[in-house]
Amino acid sequence: MESRELSESMEQLEKDGTLNPAPAQEAGETVVENVESGEVAATAASGDSKYADFSKENLVSAFEELLQKPLDDIKDEVTAIKAAFIQIRKGEIEKEKAEFLAAGNEESAFAIKDDPIEARFKELINIVKEKRTQQLAEQEAVKAENLAKKQAIIEQIIAITDDPDNINRQFSKVQQLQQEFKAIGPVPASSDSDIWKSYQLANEKFYDLLKINKELRDYDFRKNLEIKQQLCAEAEALDEMDDLIAAYKKLQELHEKWRETGPVAKEIREDLWERFKNASSVIRKKHQAFFEERKSAEKENADAKVALCEKIETISTDGLKSYNAWEAATKQILALQEEWKKLGFASIKANKALFARFRKSCDDFFAKKADFFKTMKEELAANLAHKLQLCEKAEALKDSTEWKTTTEIFVSMQKEWKTIGPVVKKHSDAVWKRFNAACDAFFESKKKLSNNAHAVEHDNLKQKKELIAQLNQALESEDPKEGAAKVRELMNMWGTIGHVPFKEKDKIYADYREAVDKAFEKFDMRGSRANLSNFENNISQMSSDKANFERDRLVRIYEARCSELKTYVNNMGFLNANSKSGNSLVKELERKVEHLKEDIALLEQKIKMLDDKS
């Protein structure tokens, strides 16, 4: 049989039961046995079996060990193993199919893979079935043999009643036959009632129709009367029992004893039987009402469990994005589980299906919760790593004196910190204090420097005022060359003086420009002044990036001019000005040196303007 056929076979076994017959009562079958079988199945279906956590291999091993024991001793164990195995196998097949469909395959193309463990399990089931079949066959053979023995005894009793002349001599023989009849085991259920009636008729005919020793007959009748009256009293007492299952089982035992007890006097026979039958009827009606009530209760329990299944299925995990949201939903799930535990059993078939449905919803929820917590743990770890990186970066920069650039970096890091998600609570305060301490250290240093810079700016203001006074004093020079040189020297000095207080910046610069303009006018320095004015107009329209690029370019030119000036000055040291040609060359070099100095001074002014702009 293929794996799929075996699964279907096991599903059928699950419905019908290999070791447990269908629950419909047969003659001689006790209702307690029937209920006990149902309780075993219900236990297996609800997952309370000791085999619930066994693997397939362990179940097969346990099954094989059980087969070493008598069949009647292991039927409940086999039922529990079978239920556990089928549950595992169904789960594997559902998983195979889900993976098959997830891979993009057509459902019609799905075929269950062969499972050697399942094949072995089927072999064990077949062994049980074969043993059971063999056992039933042997039991039926024994019952048929018992039927033949009882029929032979009845025929002997009938033969004795047909010989009334020797009846007194045969009384002990009949008693012996009666004991033999009682000692014989059960017969086929279909013949049980008929053979008992035949036996009763033969006995009654023996006592009623034959004239036996009256004293012996009366003694037998009295003894039977006492037994049957006691049986009636016990049957009537069953009405007081609260356990209807036990009462019904006891009633069956009383009926068996009644059947084994001989007749009573004919005149009281019917009344005595009517008493016993009425007592039995009370218990049977109660028993029937009990099972009808239980069936109704099972229906109510099934409806309640369906409602719980529907309720738990409405709990969506899509909107659960925080720990608190998940914990609130978890409380709902746990509350529904507590409600489920308070409900009684539904019918065996319905209870099993509903439990699987409810359990699936719970398992799906807690699996998604586990995934969420795993993801959150990873995110929290990533957030912590990110914040630790910012801490390290902040600590590395906290002593920087590049105030403008570093300030921008710190502001950027603070903004970035706000965009990072939370971290584990035990690290949250520590990592924040670490980052904040580095930020505070930098800005505190900057604040102290700013206070010092304020004093420096006032000193710079004083120096620039003095320089403007020197410019105005240079205007009194009558030598244009000497005056221009002094002005350029003062202009170079101006470029070396740092910032002044912001509110004084425009005024002091205006005074400086006014003095420079007068000097340029007096000493004919308009070319340089015009150059600076044009450059100042140009940089006012430059972007920050372009201004930085222009500054780099001017610095390179400045360095080249300084190098060239140094070369000329060195060369001049090797020339002899005594000759006519030497004197001419020295003057040329002096002219070039002056031009280079003017260029260098102009470049310094332009670089200073660019620095002031930034």
Image (spheres, rainbow, N blue to C red):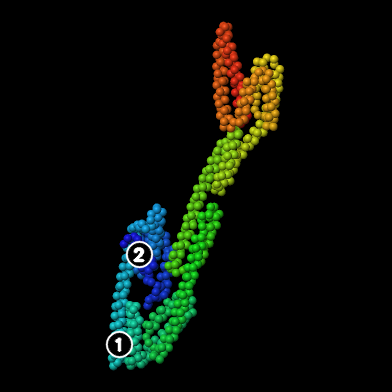
Q: Marks 1 and 2: CB-CB under 8 Å?
A: no
x then y, percent, for residue 475: 70, 19
Q: Nearer the viewer, mark 1 or mark 2?
A: 2
Location of residue 450 (image quadrant)? top right
Q: Nearer the viewer, residue 210 or 338?
A: 338
Residue type highlighted by circle 1:
Ile
Closer to the chain start, of discs 1 and 2, is 2
Disc 2 is placed on an element classified as helix
In this rendering, the answer to whether 345 lies above or below 321 is below
Kindly report the distance in space between the C-alpha atoms of the residues bearing marks 1 and 2.
52 Å
| Labelled disc at residue 158 | 1
Q: Position of residue 508 (x, y in %)?
A: 69, 27
Helix, strand or loop at mark 1 = helix
Quadrant, the C terminus: top right
At horizontal 44% and vertical 76% (from top left) the residue drawn is 246
Give the residue at mark 2: 9
Counting from the top left corner in percent of width and height, residue 522 is at: 68, 18
Which residue corresponds to the image point at 29% horizontal and 92% vertical from the top-left?
164
Q: Is residue 310 visible?
A: yes
The structure residue drawn at horizontal position 57% and vertical position 43%, both measured from the top left corner, is 417
Q: Outermost residue, top direction? A: 579
Residue 92 is at least partly visible in this image: no
Q: Is residue 548 above or below residue 77?
A: above
Q: Quadrant of residue 235?
A: bottom left
* Few, some or many residues within 10 Å of mark 1 (<14, 14–19, 20+): some
Residue 118 drawn at (x, y percent):
35, 60
Q: Callout 2: 10 Å neighbours few (<14), some, many (20+)?
A: some
Q: Amino acid at mark 2?
A: Ser
The structure residue drawn at horizontal position 39% and vertical position 90%, both measured from the top left corner, is: 265
Answer left or right for 523 relative to 178. Answer: right
